[in-house]
């Protein structure tokens, strides 16, 4: 039996040798592969922003199914191939925050196991952002959520107006914290005819930096409300109040620490002149509106004849629409980072500013590897 001729390994594959430069072109093609945009929520109110973004990009929304089973579990099914592509998951946060978080985590993990190249979360309002500091025996939940998103497979996040900018340090991957202030400033200039007679108001000293930034850009005056009755975040922002005081606590002999005087709120005062002017209260989140309603009453007493409230994220929980309708507030202006169509039907004072333009441009630039500096022109730390 004749012996078969065995060719060396190199000689067998020598005629398949790639031409010079082909490896570079393959790498370039991989780097410039396609992208898809998915919505991590299937309800009509939450997919509205995703549809606006895809229309601006000239793309179609990715095919997926997100639903809740009868036992309450979340199920996500990806209906098309995503191998080697940049995937952008748009997740707006409705009232059921925990379900929205699970939808995002499960979709990110499904895309990761489907061999997506990059998974970028577009989360205009980042949930649990108010729980970013240690409070007594609590926990920093925002840090936990950042770790969960990284473990699920996200490689990048696009968000807007984080409650605390230091939250970006919780993540092990890049975070682009966009700003809504250019859109809100444009609304003031175009929709408030006599805005030159306005004054920018911070409803607490904590919001003074943001209000000062608005005032400087619009060349307007600044007022600050000081001495509000409710507790602020600064009252319990770390664990130094823990453990609680015990009357009969045993003290080590010779250990006498200086006694810390308890905080006492001063009487409510308005620092700045608002008499005969339009008052524009600015903040990042408007959720429970009691503090805004109380601030509006104070400004009315001080002589303001019109009161606007402007915020990036309009959560408007509980009875917020009814309280706004019955209050001295003339108009509440928020962006569409959070769906609030139901609240608008309940209260015609609520107006919406569309921010899909900047989100779609951020998606385009990240996919094409372009600089994001253009989206942060003239943006300062206080914005």
Image: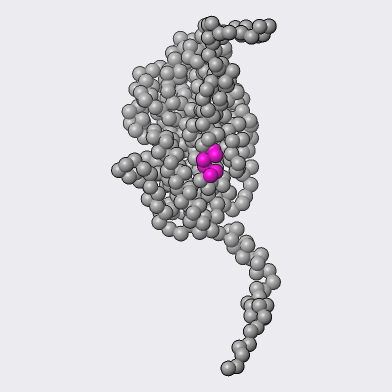
| Along the viewing direction, whichever of 241 and 121 lies nearer the viewer | 241
| Magenta-colored span | 146-151
* Residue 139 pos. (x, y %): 53, 28
* Residue 214 pos. (x, y %): 57, 26
Is the residue 295 above or below the residue 126 in the image? above
Q: Quadrant of the N terminus?
A: bottom right
Q: Is residue 310 left or right of residue 321?
A: right
Query: In the picture, residue 219 is in which quadrant?
Result: top right
| Along the viewing direction, whichever of 248 and 271 lies nearer the viewer | 248
- Residue 62 among those drawn in magenta: no
Q: Residue at x 46, y 59 (%)?
A: 81
Is the residue 287 above or below the residue 271 in the image? below
Q: Is residue 1 left or right of residue 295?
A: right
* Residue 252 pos. (x, y %): 64, 9
**What is the residue that sits farthest to the left in this orientation?**
70
Q: Residue at x 42, y 35 (%)?
A: 97
Q: Is residue 375 left or right of residue 91?
A: right
Q: Quadrant of the C terminus?
A: top right
Task: State the count of labels.
Answer: 0
Is the residue 267 above or below the residue 175 in the image? above
Q: Is residue 20 visible?
A: yes
| Along the viewing direction, whichever of 257 and 90 lies nearer the viewer | 257
Q: Residue at x 53, y 53 (%)?
A: 86
Is the residue 376 above or below the residue 236 in the image? below
Q: Main secondary structure of the magenta part?
A: helix
Display coloring: one colour
Q: Residue at x 51, y 31 (%)?
A: 141
Q: Is residue 275 visible?
A: no
């Amino acid at each position: 039996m004749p012996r078969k001729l065995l060719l060396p390994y190199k000689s067998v594959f020598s005629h398949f040798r790639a031409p010079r430069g082909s490896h570079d072109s393959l790498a370039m093609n991989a780097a410039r592969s396609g992208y898809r945009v998915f919505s991590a929520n299937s309800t009509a109110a939450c997919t509205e922003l995703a549809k606006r973004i895809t229309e601006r990009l000239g793309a179609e929304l990715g095919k997926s199914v997100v639903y809740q089973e009868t036992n309450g579990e979340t199920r996500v099914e990806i209906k098309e191939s995503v191998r080697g592509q940049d995937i952008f998951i748009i997740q707006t946060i409705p009232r059921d925050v925990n379900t929205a978080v699970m939808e995002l985590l499960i979709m990110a993990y499904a895309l990761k196991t489907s061999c997506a190249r990059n998974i970028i979360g577009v989360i205009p309002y980042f949930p649990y952002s108010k729980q970013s500091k240690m409070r007594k025996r609590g926990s920093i939940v925002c840090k936990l959520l950042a770790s969960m998103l990284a473990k699920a497979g996200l490689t990048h996040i696009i968000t807007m107006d984080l409650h605390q900018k230091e939250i970006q340090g919780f993540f092990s991957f890049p975070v682009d914290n966009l700003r809504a202030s250019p859109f809100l400033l444009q609304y003031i200039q175009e929709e408030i005819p006599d805005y030159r007679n306005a004054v920018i108001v911070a409803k607490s000293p904590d919001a003074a930096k943001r209000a000062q930034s608005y005032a400087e850009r619009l060349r307007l005056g600044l007022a600050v409300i000081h001495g509000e009755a409710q507790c602020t975040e600064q009252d319990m922002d770390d664990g130094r109040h823990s453990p609680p005081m015990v009357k009969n606590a045993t003290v080590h002999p010779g250990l006498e620490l200086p006694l810390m005087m308890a905080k006492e709120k001063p009487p409510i005062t308005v620092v700045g002149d608002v008499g005969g002017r339009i008052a524009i209260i600015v903040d990042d989140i408007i959720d429970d509106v009691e503090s805004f309603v109380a601030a509006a009453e104070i400004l009315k007493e001080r002589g303001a004849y019109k009161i606007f409230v402007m915020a990036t994220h309009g959560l408007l929980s509980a009875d917020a629409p009814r309280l706004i309708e019955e209050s001295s507030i003339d108009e509440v202006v928020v962006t569409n980072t959070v769906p609030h169509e139901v609240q608008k039907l309940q209260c015609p004072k609520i107006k919406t500013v569309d921010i899909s333009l900047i989100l779609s441009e951020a998606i385009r630039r990240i996919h094409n590897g372009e600089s994001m500096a253009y989206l942060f022109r003239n943006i300062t730390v206080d914005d």
